[in-house]
Image (spheres, grey):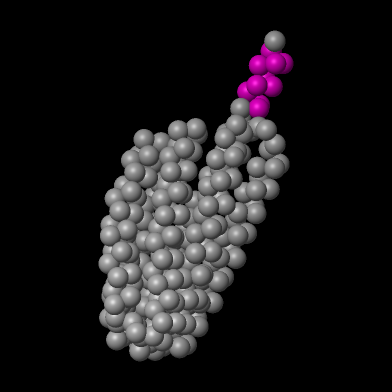
Amino acid sequence: MLILLKGIMYSGALEDQAKRKATTILQDEITRILQATRDLANLPDLMAKRDKEGIANLLSQVSDIENEVESHRRKITKEMADVGGLIMNRENILNTAYTIDEIGGHITGIAFKLSNVKSATLKNSKLDKDLTDLLDLVVGEVQKLSEVARYINTNSAEAISLAQETQEIEREIDIKYRKATIKAMNSINNTAEMILMKDVIEGIEEMADKCQEVSDLFIMLAFSL
């Protein structure tokens, strides 16, 4: 009986250790996403200034961060594989890591497309401010996710409360997304440029939706951890 009890305690200790390690990796992953989102938010200003060197450096930085996020995702996949069936909620952890990784893909996609919009198009349509406003809201949304990640292991109630706040930001993004889309369609005469700009705006909205998905996954993790 004593041996069985020790085995259960040992198993429980291993599970707690694996959970802490996994959530630490998630925290690092979302921190890198936050940095990439902040970098992305500077792109409209660089475009308006026609700062080619600054744009090139930003694209390189965003690409590097995407690779780092992918590395974190592979690391957490390995951790979950190593512990096998020890963690009951390992699928939630993996889904969260993979969804955060998808946000990184959205960031690089938006950055690439926006960098290929002509500066004159951005200036004449006056969409640079709209894009900056949208991206600033997304930065705020990811900032909330970063705060949630810090509380998952220590204060699940606070983590859940913060995660729910992202819904308000996401609704505001939806409103600005629709206005920016209509503005792009009405102010850009060149069809190719209009489609490219529309893709950029839609990419930002899809990124915000993916952030909301991560928020929901964090809530599930907070309940289970």
Answer above or below: position of 117 versus 155. below
Q: Position of residue 38 (x, y in %)?
A: 40, 67
Question: From where the camera sits, is residue 175 visible?
Answer: yes
Q: Position of residue 198 (x, y in %)?
A: 40, 72
Q: Position of residue 71 (x, y in %)?
A: 62, 59
Q: Which of these two is toward me, 61 or 10? A: 61
Q: Residue at x 40, y 76 (%)?
A: 197
Q: Which of these two is toward me, 205 or 222? A: 205
Residue 155 counted in the magenta span: no
Q: Residue at x 70, y 10 (%)?
A: 1
Answer above or below: position of 21 versus 120. above
Q: Residue at x 61, y 27 (%)?
A: 12
Answer above or below: position of 18 versus 35. above
Q: Magenta residues, as a range?
A: 2-11
Answer above or below: position of 160 versus 178. above
Question: From where the camera sits, is residue 153 visible?
Answer: no
Of all residues, the one furthest to the top in this rendering is 1
Q: Residue at x 35, y 89 (%)?
A: 120
Q: Is residue 224 left or right of residue 176?
A: right
Q: Position of residue 13 (x, y in %)?
A: 61, 30
Q: Main secondary structure of the magenta part?
A: helix
Number of labels in the image equals: 0
Query: Would you identify the image quadrant in which residue 118 lies?
Result: bottom left
Query: Would you identify the image quadrant in which residue 219 lies?
Result: top left
